[in-house]
Image: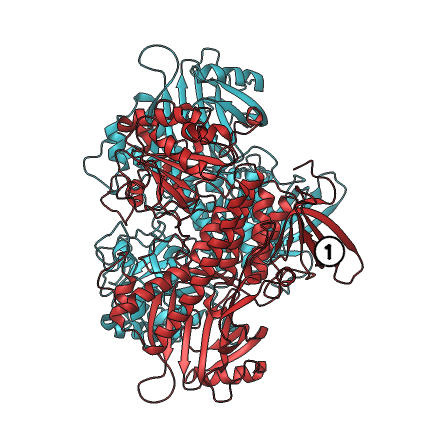
Chain colours: A red, B cyan
Amino acid sequence: MASTPDGYYDIVIIGAGPVGLMLSTCLARWGYKIKHIDNRPEPTATGRADGIQPRSLDLLQNMGLKGAIMAYQPAKVYEVAFWDPPATGDGIVRTGTWASCPSFIDARHPFTTLLHQGMIERVFLGDLEKNGVEVQRPWTITGFKSDENENPEYPVEVNLEHIEGSSRETIRAKYLFGGEGARSFVRQQLEIPVTHKDPIAHVWGVMDGVVKTDFPDIKMKCTVHSHHGSIMIIPREDNMVRLYIQIASSTDPDWHPRKTATAEEVQKTAKKIFEPYSIEWESVAWYSVYPIGQGIAERYTLDHRVFLGGDACHTHSPKAGQGMNTAFLDALNLAWKIHFVEKGFANRDVLKTYEVERKAVAESLLSFDNKYAKLFSERIPQASEVEQASREADESADDNEFVKTFKEGCEFTSGYGVAYGPNVFNWSKEHAASSYLIHPEGVKLRTGHIMINADVTRVADANHIHLENAVPLNGSFRIFVFAGKPSTTKTALRDFARGLEKKSSFFSVYRRSDEAAVSHHEKHNPHSLLYTFSVIFASKRSDVEISRDVPEVLARYRDNIFADDRWDRRVPDAAAAAHAKMGLDQERGGVVVVRPDGYVGVVAKLVEGSGTVDALNEYFGSFSNKSVGALLAQI
Amino acid sequence: MASTPDGYYDIVIIGAGPVGLMLSTCLARWGYKIKHIDNRPEPTATGRADGIQPRSLDLLQNMGLKGAIMAYQPAKVYEVAFWDPPATGDGIVRTGTWASCPSFIDARHPFTTLLHQGMIERVFLGDLEKNGVEVQRPWTITGFKSDENENPEYPVEVNLEHIEGSSRETIRAKYLFGGEGARSFVRQQLEIPVTHKDPIAHVWGVMDGVVKTDFPDIKMKCTVHSHHGSIMIIPREDNMVRLYIQIASSTDPDWHPRKTATAEEVQKTAKKIFEPYSIEWESVAWYSVYPIGQGIAERYTLDHRVFLGGDACHTHSPKAGQGMNTAFLDALNLAWKIHFVEKGFANRDVLKTYEVERKAVAESLLSFDNKYAKLFSERIPQASEVEQASREADESADDNEFVKTFKEGCEFTSGYGVAYGPNVFNWSKEHAASSYLIHPEGVKLRTGHIMINADVTRVADANHIHLENAVPLNGSFRIFVFAGKPSTTKTALRDFARGLEKKSSFFSVYRRSDEAAVSHHEKHNPHSLLYTFSVIFASKRSDVEISRDVPEVLARYRDNIFADDRWDRRVPDAAAAAHAKMGLDQERGGVVVVRPDGYVGVVAKLVEGSGTVDALNEYFGSFSNKSVGALLAQI
């Protein structure tokens, strides 16, 4: 990329909110040349999104950004409390509290992290700076066109302007990304309509501030219903609290979606709702009125050169707490696919999966939100139902509709409910693969879902490692070779390595051209920018000898060779907990291919002979630009 | 302290290594006026100490500094490997690997953290800056005198000078602390002799650098013995490794403690020792020769106004990895005692316990080091012995001498072996207390030892909390009221609160004078700078209602009210794991007093009537300046 001429960029990113920053941060780390602009002179100062879901925190940890987020001492929400009017009389009473990420979800961070969006943006901006990207502010986009015939390499022309009109630039890029929020200029120019799933049915006032109150759950996430109206409470950093206060509802006799209220009016309402508890404001950091309904853009792109993401293509009810998390995953999904196309690996068609995967998620989130709200408006769940819903067992035949919806709700709000349907990347059981090794019996990993977490011990330094986090977000497919017992899989592992080294393998076809110059300290990408290998033995650490047990090509990933010897409470009797959690044979292992964004792509048996690599050749060959594997070479 | 006149300080601290920085950081946080100087123009650039023990990492976490340490991505040592010559033939073979902090030690961080001392210093300097303290560099001390008759409030006069002699200051202070290392000017002026426990018996070369090697355990801590000499390997951040290479030993025929060697000579020796493995240096960051023997200063103070700490009063074999950790605990031990004297709580006599407690620790470390080395030089332990030594059970009748010493070694190297003998602060079973409630049957907490860790749930926000870390290092005694079952202890808890509120109680006698002005957001010191209360119920979180179950004075500590409802693998069958781990009755609870530095002071039963507060009055009254409790008031 060093050779990109002046005025030419790999990508132009409009907007430095969560979606733009995540995209920029990924692509900057992977070496792309970026022009990133934002029309605000500073990062977000107050208000906006503030909820990081459990799954998103995993992602930030995988990016090495969790520490910087936690340094701001955010609030953590482990439980949600429900307050309602009592059966008789005035006031409010607590009717229940539930875990926001119950133990049936196997989460590393079973809580939502609440932190002002501006601080989260600063963490990303700090990372971008390390990679030489500075957001150009306050600049805006005034026009663009995209024509592959005019310039096949840099088909997009973009016009940028300082918001005071004092300066202008016209630049060319391979891609343009519109992440400028709900009123996206890029979306409007593309004339992409937004479908409102749900007409505006509520107007909410949102207030961030510091309060003094004797309400006992002020540090919890709460839904408060009273005869005077409804409030949602979200605790925040620095003793702050966010209150969502319903100003108007479509069921009101005088309903109007443009109805508004002053901060003082809203505070007065809040005081009534909180009775018999008292509440006083020491300070108000931000106040706004949200009449926004939920909508989805019909397209996320027109030509796979100009893309949209985040609020530019889907808006949520603010109280669903989905905005920033959905934005992160939009950006991540697009980032690695652009990377694979630009590295000459994948054919340009894979970019189509961005809209398919992410729009389906946005739609299911929105329709789920409606279903959930409807269910709760009908009746208050019983304690026994909550208890049942929170149990560890994944599925239970006797779950009633409420319990099912509640569980689904927890999965959505934790972020673990995001899952991609079967496609070229996600090979389900039903995939018409010719290899019989794909998707072995008993596997608990689900393609299109996030990899299951597991603790392992690194052989080289005996460090305790979170396997799902062992490989950082480096834009590579993560190939986990669960190698079972070394004595059982010795030949299979050797044959796997031989298969990799064959000239036509998915691995050999995409080896780095600069491989000879790569430092011996390089941990994850010594051979290829597109694959990182890990090997996990069902052994005690001290029984693994890398030089004896691991074929040379895999031994090069010495930081990613693990012993599956850590006890796990979820599989207390398993000798090899990581194998057991994945549903892989503890003797024979299996190979798990995880997409660069952490979602499981395909699982194959580990067998003697060429079968396992043949299966992976088939998988990678299905979206590769070059022909991969012996069979495909004959096509 | 705001009223301290110009040129007058609470304390003058000489030296900004680990001991000086820890002392300065504590006292700055607690509001003292500090003059802190160092004779180096910059923090440590290369070399020196680099090992943070498990217990020290707990301490740094309690200070809120762990995140900043971990942001440097230090190496973590979980296991130690031993390499020796094979039974026959040349070269080296691995003879065993052992956990450096085996599971019989209940540690939150069962690893040693390896990071360059300069980075650790920078973390402290950053914290000091937030509290308005800047280390004055490069300045040195040229003289001092201490005379309480001349000036009872600021008895110490200190002469300071820029190392180039360009500028001078004479200032007065309440205390002077010499933390300037092994060649301490303050110690020399006080004419305190150093006793060498052990004459210099080895000369070691120490080299930090980046290497390329096929030695498989280069990322582990290793002890390598070969026919060509001995090496100790310590992994470091940034792909670095530290090698300690023995240059000379008193058993050599040509032994001389001044023997030295060049970096090239040492590298040549290392290559021979590593055979048949290869080792090449890519870079060398630091090289030094260490002929230092182990010694202890005879006194740590003369008049309890001028103190010494860290290397100024004890030097260790560098390979014991004790230097920085011992320095931290010296400083912490002194800091809170000065705080208690200066706040008018404790009589000045308590300062005597600094030397008593810390010198005993230094002596036991040194004598243990000799014992350990001797045991290992006699024979290589058998695998079964290591296995036995690593088991969870605390003590076992059939432990042989090796296993006992090994366990003791693990406790020392992890930092959990540091324990203080019975004295005014640490009331053992044998203490001649008049209260029969002190040290109830079955208690597993040991006075003078660190508090046992436990997981609990905070009632106010349902956050999962490490109980031992719930109260930050705020200079206060931590009083943990384990309240058992609310239905059982209702009266006892009410009586405890009533006892506190009595005018003569240890609590009432030392309430803050500015209590009325304290913010309602203050979590830990709303009533007093000297005590922080916590209440832990043996209940599920959702069953605790603070307004109903907690008396008002204790309910004010709403952030420190916990439910003991988290499962713990070490007491898998306990309904209330924290109570069980402490050895407290799960119905009736008990009160645990923890010193400001985290060591258990006293444990008492929680009973109905005045007994429990009487017991605490007796404890605190034994070192308080004011008379405390009804009984003492009559003396």
Residue A524 in view in this figure: yes
A410 or B399: nearer the eye?
A410
Residue ID for mark 1? A160
Q: Residue at x 38, y 70 (%)?
A: A371
Q: Position of residue B465 (x, y in %)?
A: 38, 58
Q: Residue at x 63, y 60 (%)?
A: A190
The relative height of residue A604 versus residue A186 in the rendered view (above or below) is above
A87 or A525: nearer the eye?
A525
Which quadrant of the rendered structure holds the N terminus of chain B?
bottom right
Q: Which residue lies furthest to the right in this view?
A: A166
B219 or A341: nearer the eye?
A341
Q: Where is residue B309 in the image (x, y as percent from the top left)?
A: 51, 43
The relative height of residue A444 versus residue A373 in the rendered view (above or below) is above
Q: Quadrant of residue A374?
A: bottom left
Residue B12 in view in this figure: no
B485 or B92: nearer the eye?
B92
Q: Position of residue A204 (x, y in %)?
A: 52, 77
Which quadrant of the rendered structure holds the C terminus of chain B?
bottom left
